[in-house]
Image: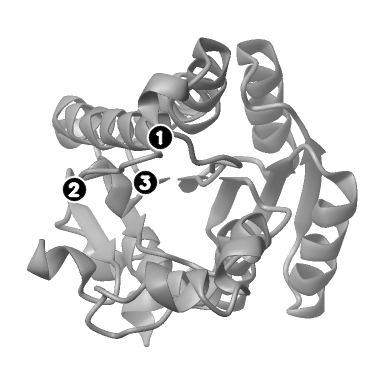
Amino acid sequence: MPLFDLTGKKAFITGASRGIGQAIAVALAGAGADLALVARSEDGLAETAAQVTTLGRKAFVIPADVTRQESVAAAVAQAIDQLGYLDIVVNNAGGSRFMVPFLDLRLSGWDKLIRLNLDSAMYVCHAAGPHLVERGSGSVINIASVAGVSAAPFLAPYGAAKAGLISLTKSLAVEWGTLGVRVNALCPGWTATDLNRNLWEDETAGPATVATVPMRRWARPEEMSGPAIFLASEASSYMTGQVLLIDGGQTAIS
């Protein structure tokens, strides 16, 4: 459908080497966009790029550590140089490799997760924002989490970072609203990715984790693709500052 057509659009996406980021990248390409793919894993980025080029779209691989401001600034500049301009920015880099009671949390762990899940997106917005504002158009999609809108026991730093990202989303949406740039947050629920494979593959812990989710299952990374295309396209042209929850109904009963 024309409303969801991204032909001629240029997208910058972090965390594009696997999981949700890879799925969204491939979907954006399928809708017609050319991509700048950013992550630390060159092998993973090469795999994503191969899927994108198979669809007939351009894919530029940009290895970068998004927890470092200088690295992000260089990546955004390189993407603009290679693509010519940016229409879509997807801040997907993030995650948590541990669950721990708050009182057992090492402060270094807190700092690490805040940098990865909040600061990284802030760096990207700060670097790409002037370009989008100058062009007078663009869609920024911040991949947050249901952990940012409800309690996240044993995931306190992750939840706090995602809540901060949602707040940043709303603030930038208001600041950039009259400048033609839209900013929204997409919040996945429990999604089966390589990062949490040890949890969802566990015959006991996997089902227990989603026991209170009305749909009673884990999401697939590909199930975040449609919502991402919606937010990137003209289909959501009057939508900004919003939090789109894709969680199998999890937050509907909390």
Q: Is residue 25 visible?
A: no
Q: Is the residue 209 above or below the residue 138 in the image?
A: below
Q: Is residue 166 visible?
A: yes
**Residue type, numbered disc 2:** Thr
Dot 1: element: helix
Q: Earlier in the sequence, mark 2 or mark 1?
A: 1
Q: Is the residue 9 above or below the residue 117 in the image?
A: below
Q: Quadrant of the C terminus?
A: bottom left
Dot 2: element: loop
What x and y, as percent, mark residue 194? 68, 62
Q: How would you rate the neighbour count of disc 3 (Cα within 10 Å): few for under 14, some for 14-19, many for 20 or more?
A: many
Q: CA distance from mark 3 to mark 1?
A: 26 Å
Label 3, on which residue?
Answer: 144
Q: Is the residue 155 above or below the residue 70 in the image?
A: below
Q: Which mark is residue 231?
A: none
Label 1, on which residue?
Answer: 135
User: Which residue lies at the image location 69% right of the left edge and 47% below the top edge?
Assistant: 36
Label 2, on which residue?
Answer: 240
**Residue type, numbered disc 1:** Arg
User: Which residue lies at the image location 79% right of the left edge and 49% below the top edge?
Assistant: 60
Q: Quadrant of the rendered structure where residue 35 is?
A: bottom right
Q: Earlier in the sequence, mark 3 or mark 1?
A: 1
146, 207: nearer the viewer: 207
**Residue type, numbered disc 3:** Ala
Q: CA distance from mark 2 to mark 1?
A: 17 Å
Dot 3: element: loop
